[in-house]
Every structure is written in structure tokens, then in C-alpha cells.
Image (cartoon, helix red, strand yellow):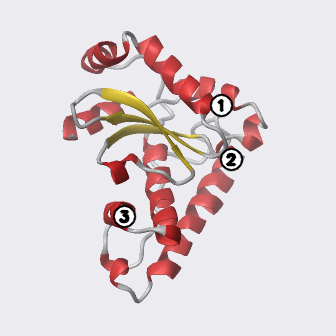
Amino acid sequence: MAFELPQLPYDMNALEPHISKRTLEFHYGKHHKAYVDKLNSLVEGTAQASKSLEDLIRESEGGVFNNAAQVWNHTFYWNGMSALGGGEPSSALKSELEKNFGSVEEFKNQVTNQGLGLFGSGWTWLIKDSDGSLKIHNESNAGNPLRVGKTPLLTVDVWEHAYYLDYQNARKGYLDNFWNLINWQFIEDNLEKS
């Protein structure tokens, strides 16, 4: 069974003015789709074709890993944002963030600073570590914390194609505006499932 490009959880223009419809047309409609198409071409007719994305991320190397991880990472990223996002987390999530980072503001600062500090392309993740603590974790290129036994709770795409049409080289502007879109419920749901 072939991998499919999942539907976005909102309309293409739903994240404006922070992320434009034009960016989503390219980022989702071309980049994300290309990863799905390439993955399908790489695994067609092999035993890997029947594996889950998660298994491919944990077990594969090279092009299969890169494309499987990018399909998964992008899908996770889209769900971490909402047209109704921003604001404050629920009191339960707020307590969890305060326990691990000191405050919600400090959590935001750490995500933003890690995203700014990642050289080149990659992803900034909020993860649950094996000891149950929450941490900010950077992965270069197609990196995914599933590969190292961590539980992803949220990710921010810091590849230039995620923001260049809207922010050019101003990654900080993109990261600052991400907080207007953050889907706190998505983090909470992932934490409850972990």
C-alpha cells in the first residue's frame, strides 16, 4: 500500500498572516508531496513498502530514512499549528511546562533560541525523554527523535522552505510568529498518549 499525502488539518489560507497560503502551496503542496512520492518510489516492490513510517524512521538508512522522516515530520508539524492557535496552554499543560522549564515564557524562549541556533536545515522538537522529563531537542536535516527512543510532542520546521517566502532570511520573525499558531491541545494530547 502506497504512502499518501495526508490532508492538512486546516485550509491553505488558515495560518495567515503568520504563514501565507503561498508558503503552504509550496511547503505542503510541493515539498511534503515530493517526500511522499519519493518514498513510494524507493520502497515500491520491497519489504519496506508494508512498514509504517515510524518503523522506517527507526530501521532504515539513506534515502528511505530521509523521505520517511520528512513525511512524518511534516505531518506532525502541520498538526502542531492551528488557525485558532496561540494564547495560553491549559492549566495542566502549563503546570507541566513550568515544572520542566520554569515558565511557559521560558519554554517559548528555549524553543525559539534552539531553532535560531540550529545551523542549516532541521527541526526543533519538544520531546518527552525516557525519564519522563520534557526537553527541547534539535535534529538536523530529516532527523527525528523516534530514532533515538524519544517521544515527540511538538516540532517546528526550521528548513528555509518553511519560512523563506514570508520572512526571507529572518528565521527569528518566523519563530516569533509560530507562537501565534501553536496548537497547545496537540501537545497535551501527545503527552497524554506518551
The residue singled out by tag 2 in the image is: 23
| Mark 1 or 2, nearer chain start | 2
The percent position of residue 159, horizontal first and vertical second, equals: 63, 46
Q: Is residue 180 visible?
A: no
Residue at disc 1, secondary structure: helix
- Residue 135's tag is none
Residue at disc 3, secondary structure: helix
Q: Is residue 188 above or below residue 77?
A: above
The answer for how far apart the CA atoms under marks 3 and 2 are is: 25 Å
Q: Quadrant of residue 104?
A: top left
Q: Are marks 3 and 2 in contact (CB under 8 Å)?
A: no
Residue ID at (32%, 18%): 100
Quarter holding the C terminus? top left
Label 3: how many Cα within 10 Å (few below 14, some 14–19, many 20+)? many
Q: Quadrant of residue 96?
A: top left
Residue ID at (37%, 64%): 53
Q: Nearer the viewer, residue 14 or 81?
A: 81
Quarter holding the N terminus? bottom left
The percent position of residue 36, horizontal first and vertical second, equals: 51, 68
Q: What kind of residue is marked 1?
A: Tyr
| Mark 1 or 3, nearer chain start | 3
The residue singled out by tag 3 in the image is: 53
Q: What kind of residue is marked 2?
A: Thr
- Residue 174's tag is 1
Residue ID at (68%, 48%): 161
